[in-house]
Amino acid sequence: MTRRALITGITGQDGSYLAELLLEKGYEVHGIKRRASSFNTQRVDHLYQDPHLGDGRFRLHYGDLTDASGLTRILAETEPHEVYNLGAQSHVGVSFEAPDYTAQVDALGTLHLLEAIRFLKREGETRFYQASTSELYGQVAEVPQTETTPFHPRSPYGVAKLYAHWITVNYREAYGLYACNGILFNHESPRRGETFVTRKITRGLARIAQGLEPCLYMGNLDSLRDWGHAKDYVRMQWLMLQQDAPEDFVIATGVQHSVRDFVTWAATDLGVTLRFEGNGVEEVAVAESVTGDLAPGIRASDVVLRIDPRYFRPAEVNTLLGNPAKARAKLGWSPQITAREMCAEMVAADLMLARQERTAREAQ
Ligand code: NDP
Ligand code: GDR
């Protein structure tokens, strides 16, 4: 029998990789996309087949996590065996500017899905995966963080996700739903949204290297994160729903780096050695030497990075480091791609895009 999955957030980074993985495994994949005034399906366009021509195993439905009745209808129509709730207002910085909306989508959106699953009672089990986050730890009380580390979120995003986390646990305990949380640490890829720090760095420096922009403006360079690759992490999302009993798992690499490290790596991959000068908001990064075959952007002695206080957050999560021991022991999972390798992949992808844009501009 063909298994059916429903993915919210299918147009996002993780949703696109998870859809690919499930299609490879033979699933029928249904995804929820939001109505937007311009195209927002670029990350999954390569999966789309004309339902009249292809095998129709990939289908998109209009919906929104704030629209409970719409979600219930989609669940009733698609009758999924597995629901992956990846949809969210997922930007921590933006959540300070849109706290109410973030709560509606990230907290109540999760409740809407759980309620729909509980009421519809598909014949056989509907398993539920919740995209929980290391942002729950916030002001960390323990290093490294495990499934039992206390939570202290530091943003409206983190607090909304805390509700989503506990309502998932609650529906498991109260109604016996197969529902679990993947507490995922930061994971990135060439498909990462352009305003998250890793992609902002690889895209920004690649554009400077191609002469498309003069300078990259950043926030807190001292922030420490445990970065993995999204492809490794979606494998875990699927594995968590294949167990005999539902459980929550931390997914992380167990290795930590600073934002400044990531800037240095990306510059190195572009053939640029950086020197950091100054302190706090006065800090800048200067290109000390340039060896790459670059045109016509960075020259030695150019300032390529400046601090802009607007990118500091009202409350920061300074350090996160996960311990994935439980996932390793129980699910046999370990990440295959290091943060350094991932940075090189992201730089190569962004350099290609920047080169294409420069060529297009020159042709005008
Ligand atoms: P993205 O920001 O790339 O994708 C978010 C997805 O949610 C997009 O498809 C977006 O649609 C959709 N979405 C946003 N608002 C709504 C809404 N109101 N109704 C329906 N869908 C909506 O996130 P990621 O792929 O990086 O992350 C996936 C999930 O994992 C998120 O829940 C995130 O919070 C969580 N997470 C991510 C981590 C990471 O490091 N990437 C780590 C831990 C947790 P659109 O394309 O139209 O904007
Ligand atoms: P995060 O990711 O907040 O950890 O949330 P992000 O990449 O936005 O920030 C990581 C760290 O970098 C610092 N930083 C900057 N961040 C951004 N976005 N832009 C900047 O210019 C900048 N300069 C420094 C931040 O202050 C922060 O400390 C991500 C999201 O994917 C969440 O959805 C997910 O839950 C968590 O990861 C785990």
Image (tube, helix red, strand yellow):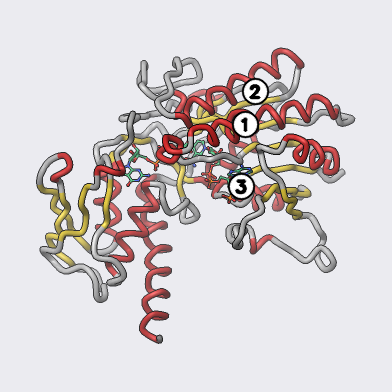
* Sequence-earlier tag: 2 or 1: 1
Q: Secondary structure at mark 1?
A: strand
Q: Which residue is mark 2?
A: 168
Q: Tell me, yes or no, whether the two marked residues, 3 and 1, touch with CB atoms within 8 Å.
A: no
What is the three-letter code of the residue carrying label 3? Gly
Q: In the figure, residue 260 lies in which quadrant?
A: top left
* The N terminus lies in quadrant: top right
* The C terminus lies in quadrant: bottom left
Determine if the C-beta at disc 3 is less than 8 A from ligand 1. Answer: yes
* Sequence-earlier tag: 3 or 1: 3
Q: Secondary structure at mark 2?
A: helix
Q: Which residue is mark 3?
A: 15
Q: Which residue is mark 1?
A: 130
Of residue 29 and residue 11, the one placed in the foreground of this image is: 11
CA–CA distance in space, label 3 to label 2: 19 Å
* Sequence-earlier tag: 3 or 2: 3
Q: Tell me, yes or no, whether the two marked residues, 2 and 1, touch with CB atoms within 8 Å.
A: yes
In this rendering, position of residue 136 left or right of residue 294: right
Residue drawn 30% across the image and 55% down it:
266
Percent x, y of residue 193: 47, 51
Q: In the figure, residue 48 lies in which quadrant?
A: bottom right
**Ligand 2 located in image quadrant:** top left
**Picture layout, residue 211 above or below residue 40:** below
